[in-house]
DNA sequence: TTGAAAGCGCTAACAC
DNA sequence: GTGTTAGCGCTTTCAA
C-alpha cells in the first residue's frame, strides 16, 4: 500500500474501535498500571490492529515532557564524533530518552541555527561539543532551563556541566614526552581550522611546554580538506623538504599522522631513531598500521557516556547541574617515540 | 546564570512586552510578509530582548506541519554513513527541513523502536537505509502517509521511493573485472553480519558471476568487531596461510582491504602480479595508501543528496512518491588488479 | 478502575 | 495590517 494522504490515527480512533474512553486508552498506551488487565488487552489489540502510532507532539504539549536529548557536534567525518555519539546512544538506551543529532561543520552561525531549531522542540537536555559559542548561543542555552553538558574540552568556562579532557594539558604532556625522549627540532602539522578550538589549545599547550624547555617549533605545515591520510603524506614530504633537520613531527590528528608514518616508512626514514612522530586521538585505525603511531587517547566514548548520564539525571554524584568531569587522556608512546635516555 | 526552573517564555510574554497581539507576534516570528515594518521591528526587538525561543511543539500541533526529516542508518562507525548524512544535511540546507538521525546498530528490533519513536513526532519524511525491514516496521512506514525513501540498495521491493545502487550488480561487475584480468583462485574476506544485506548481496552477485564463468570461491574468511584495518591484516595472513594458492582476495569493504594491502606489501607479495586485491566503497582513506586498492564507489554522498531532495519535494521529475533512482557505481581498478590480457 | 473537563502554546481561518 | 476565535491530540486533574 503506497503512502496515502488520509489523516493519521488518533486516540479517539482507538477509543471507538475498542469501546473504551480515550483517557483509558491513553493510560494503557503509556503503560500505566491502574488499568484492568481485561481493558488493557482490548485496547492493545485495537491499537495494534489499527496500526496506531501515538502523536508525541500532542503528548509533549500536554505533559510538558519531551524525551529528546539534543546532541550537537561539529562534524561526523573524522571518526571522533561518531564514537562520542555511540557512547551517548548506549548510555541513553533504556532511560526512555532519545538522542537527536545536529551537525555544525565547525561553523558558529550554524551552531546557532541548529541550537535554535532544536531548543524550540524543548528537549530534556543538550549535549554539545566545545566551550566556545556565540553570545546568542550561550544566551539560548543559559535560559533554556534544562541540563546543558559541554563535552570534549574542559579548558574554559562552562555554561552548566562539562565533561572532557584538557587539550592544553594534553599538548603539554606530549611535548614533555617528546623532549624527554631527546628530540629537539620539532615540527607541527595541522589543519587550517580557526574554529577547531581543541586543536588550537593542544598546540598552545604544546608550544608553551616547548618554550619552558627553551625550545621552539622549528617549522609548521597546515592543510585543509581532502583525504587526511593523503594530506599527511604530502605535508610530511613538504615539511621535511623545507626543513630536513627536523627530528620530530607532531600531528594534530592521527589520520594525518598515519599518512606521515606511511610516507616515512616508504622513504626509508628511521622511525623513531632519526625522526619521531606523534598524533592525537587514539583512533582504532592505528592498530592496523605497520608500526604504532604515538598518540593520546581522547576518551571519546567515555565522554559521551558520562555526558548522557548527566542529562539522564544519573550523574555519579547526586549534584544537579554544574558537574565538571575532567578525564585524563592516556599517553601511548607506540613505536614512533624512542625510549627516553636514562 | 545557571539553568533555572522558571517556565520558558511564550508568545504571550512577547505580546505583552511589545503591546502587539499574539497573532501578529506569531506572524512576525514566522517571517510572514503581511506585517508592517514598524510592528515587525517592535516585535523582533522584544523577542530578542526576552530571549524568546518559539515552542515548535505547540506550533506543529496547531499547524500539522513538522520540519523534521527522520534519517535512520545502521551505523556511524564505518565512514560510509557519515558521508550519506553529509549529503542529506547539505541538500536539506535552505529548505527549512531539519534532519534528525537515529542509529540501529544493524538490529531490526532496534530499527523498529527508533522508527516508532521518530514517527510519533510526525516528521515530514523518512530516509532509511536498506530494503529489509521487519513487518511491523514496514506497516508503520506504509501507513505514515509521508514520503519514505529507502537508500543505499535497489535490489528488492521498495515501500515508496528508493535511491541506491545494485549491490548484486556491483558484486558481479567486480567479479567480471577480476576474471577478465586472468585471476582464477579467488578468496573472499568479509564480516559476520547476517543483517548487513548489502554486503550479502554483493557476495551473492560476485559468486553468481564466478559460477557463470565456471569458477567458485576458493576460500572465505570472516571477522567481527575490532579495528577493521587490523582485522584485514590478520584475515589476510590467515587465509593465505590456509590456502596459499589464492591469486585474488575480494574484501567486503575498503578498510579490511586496506589492512590486507598493507600486510601484503610488508610481506613482499607481488601485488597485483601474484595476488590481486579489491575492496568496496571508494573510501577517501584509500588515497593515502602506498598503492591504490581496487574498489567500487558506492555513491554515498550522491545517494544522500538525492534522497533528501525527494523528501523535500525537489525530486528531479515532478512525480510524487514511488521514485526509483539507481545510481551506477564506478569501478576503479586502482593498482591492485593487473591490466587485463589483450 | 474509569470517565469528563480543561488546557498545554501555538496557528488557521476569518473578521475587521 | 491586525485582532479574535477555535481547535490541533494529547495528558492533567478531579470526580465518580
Image (cartoon, coloured by chain):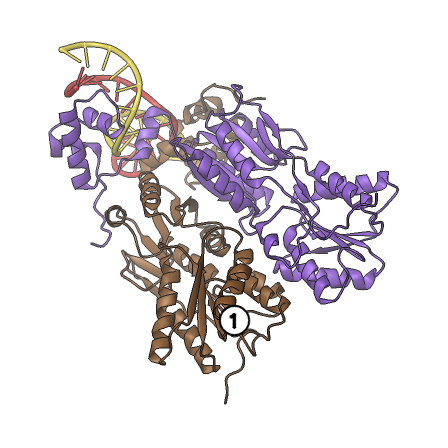
Chain colours: A purple, B brown, C red, D yellow
Q: Position of residue B274 (x, y in %)?
A: 55, 77
In this rendered view, identify the residue nearer to me: A233 or A161. Answer: A233
**SS type, badge 1:** strand
A208 to A5, vertically: above or below: above
Please identify the residue farthest to the bottom as the structure is shown: B342
Residue for badge 1: B277
Label 1: few (<14), some (14–19) or many (≥20) C-alpha neighbours in 10 Å: many
A78 to B213, vertically: above or below: above
In this rendered view, identify the residue nearer to me: A183 or B135. Answer: A183
Quadrant of the drawing holding the N terminus of chain A: bottom left
In this rendering, does residue A105 appear at all? yes
Q: Position of residue A308 (x, y in %)?
A: 49, 32
Identity of the residue drawn at 67% across and 31% down: A156
A27 to B271, vertically: above or below: above
Query: Horizontal placement of B61 versus B281: left or right?
Result: left
Quadrant of the drawing holding the C terminus of chain A: top right
Amino acid at each position: 500500500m503506497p503512502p496515502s494522504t488520509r489523516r493519521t490515527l488518533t486516540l479517539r480512533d482507538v477509543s471507538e474501535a475498542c469501546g473504551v474512553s480515550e483517557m483509558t486508552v491513553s493510560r494503557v498506551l503509556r503503560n500505566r498500571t491502574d488499568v484492568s488487565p481485561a481493558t488493557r488487552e482490548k485496547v492493545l489489540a485495537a491499537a495494534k490492529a489499527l496500526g496506531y502510532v501515538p502523536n508525541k507532539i500532542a503528548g509533549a504539549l500536554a505533559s510538558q515532557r519531551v524525551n529528546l536529548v539534543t546532541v550537537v557536534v561539529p562534524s561526523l567525518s573524522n571518526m571522533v564524533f561518531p564514537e562520542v555519539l555511540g557512547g551517548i546512544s548506549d548510555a541513553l538506551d533504556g532511560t526512555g530518552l532519545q538522542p537527536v543529532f545536529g551537525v555544525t561543520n565547525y561553523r558558529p552561525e550554524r551552531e546557532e541555527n541548529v541550537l535554535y531549531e532544536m531548543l524550540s522542540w524543548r528537549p530534556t537536555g543538550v549535549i554539545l561539543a566545545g566551550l566556545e559559542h556565540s553570545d546568542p548561543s550561550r544566551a539560548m542555552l543559559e535560559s533554556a532551563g534544562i541540563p546543558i553538558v559541554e563535552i570534549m574540552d574542559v579548558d574554559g568556562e562552562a555554561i552548566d556541566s562539562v565533561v572532557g579532557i584538557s587539550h592544553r594539558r594534553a599538548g603539554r604532556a606530549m611535548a614533555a614526552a617528546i623532549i624527554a625522549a631527546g628530540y629537539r627540532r620539532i615540527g607541527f602539522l595541522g589543519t587550517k581550522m580557526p574554529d577547531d578550538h581543541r586543536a588550537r589549545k593542544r598546540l598552545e599547550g604544546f608550544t608553551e611546554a616547548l618554550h619552558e624547555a627553551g625550545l621552539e617549533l622549528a617549522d609548521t605545515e597546515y592543510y585543509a580538506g581532502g583525504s587526511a591520510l593523503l594530506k599527511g603524506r604530502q605535508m610530511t614530504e613538504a615539511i621535511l623538504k623545507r626543513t630536513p633537520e627536523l627530528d620530530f613531527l607532531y600531528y594534530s590528528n592521527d589520520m594525518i599522522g598515519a599518512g606521515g608514518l606511511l610516507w616515512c616508512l616508504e622513504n626509508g626514514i628511521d622511525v623513531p631513531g632519526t625522526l619521531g612522530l606523534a598524533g592525537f586521538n587514539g583512533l582504532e585505525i592505528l592498530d592496523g598500521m605497520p608500526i604504532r603511531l604515538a598518540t593520546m587517547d581522547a576518551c571519546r566514548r567515555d565522554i559521551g557516556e558520562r555526558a548522557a548520564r548527566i542529562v539522564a539525571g544519573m550523574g555519579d554524584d547526586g549534584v544537579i547541574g554544574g558537574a565538571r568531569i575532567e578525564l585524563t587522556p592516556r599517553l601511548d608512546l607506540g613505536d614512533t617515540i624512542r625510549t627516553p635516555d636514562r
